[in-house]
Amino acid sequence: MKNLPTKRFILARSDDILLARYRDKDWYLTTDPVRACQLLEADAQAVLQSVIPESERFLWTLHPTQEKEGMVSC
């Protein structure tokens, strides 16, 4: 059976800003999809709840993506 890529999610804002993480420590915003953090759905939801202020969460959505070599996984 062929190994299928793991389905992961990135946090994306309505203005195309994405959430990335620097060396497993600091979260930052980026417009570069290659630098966006790719997380399992439950992990992405947990990040949304813990990192994004409640007043701004309505701006953010989880976008599914296929894990590719070179993409950041947090």
Image: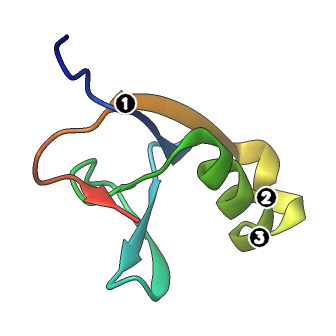
Is any atom of residue 40 visible in this view?
yes
State the quadrant of the C terminus: bottom left
Residue pointed to by mark 2: 56
The residue under the point 48% across, 50% down is 39
Labels 3 and 1: the sequence-earlier one: 3
**Which residue extends farthest front?**
1
Q: Nearer the viewer, residue 12 or 47?
A: 47
- Separation of residues labelled 2 and 3 (CA atoms): 12 Å
- Few, some or many residues within 10 Å of mark 1 (<14, 14–19, 20+): some
73 lies left or right of 44 = left
- Separation of residues labelled 2 and 1 (CA atoms): 23 Å
Q: Amino acid at mark 3?
A: Ser
Q: Which mark is residue 50?
A: 3
Q: How many marks?
A: 3
Badge 3 element = helix
Residue pointed to by mark 1: 65
